[in-house]
Image: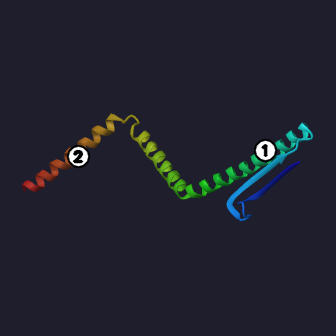
Amino acid sequence: MMKDKKYTLLNERNQPLNSEIRVKIHWIYSKVFLLEDIIVQLNQGVKTDTEMLESKKLQLKTTQDPFGNLILHYEKQFEEEEKKERVINHPIDLEKVITVREAENNLGQRIDNALAE
């Protein structure tokens, strides 16, 4: 059982002062009941804190959502670029490279001849 009371202080003329005294008395008739009450209060505090934590996590997720979508977009773009790099880095057939270079040289030669005429 707990009693908690506030008293206003008075001066010698019984006029109230700007001060108070708080008296809190706790009578413990059973240590087991006291500890059980403390456990109940602590469990309630943990439950409240857990609910608040979940609420804050939800707020954080909501706040990050617009940026989260951008992050996902950039991650996808980065993955696509990596795939392109992998394709580019495959071994190249040298015969195709030589054929392309010969065609470029022939085209360059024809352009030079046309300009010379």
Q: Earlier in the sequence, mark 1 or mark 2?
A: 1
Residue name at image x 57 percent, y 57 percent: 63
Identify the mark at residue 42; answer none if there is no mark.
1
Q: Residue 13: where, in percent of width, then height? A: 72, 64
Q: Residues within 10 Å of mark 1 (few under 14, many from 20)?
A: few
Tell me the distance, in whole angstroms, between the alpha carbons under discs 1 and 2: 82 Å
Decide which of 39, 55 is in the foreground and name it: 39
Q: Is residue 100 left or right of residue 25?
A: left
Where does the image place residue 23, in percent across and percent down from the top left?
78, 51
Residue 70 to residue 95: above or below? below
- Name the residue at 30% across, 39% down: 97
Tell me if label 1 and label 2 are in contact, CB under 8 Å: no
Quick one: which residue is furthest to the left in this view?
Answer: 117
Residue located 71% across and 57% down the image: 20
Q: How many marks?
A: 2
Q: Which quadrant: the C terminus? A: bottom left
Q: Residue at x 23, y 42 (%)?
A: 102
Query: Is 38 above or below relative to 48?
Result: above
Q: Amino acid at mark 1?
A: Leu
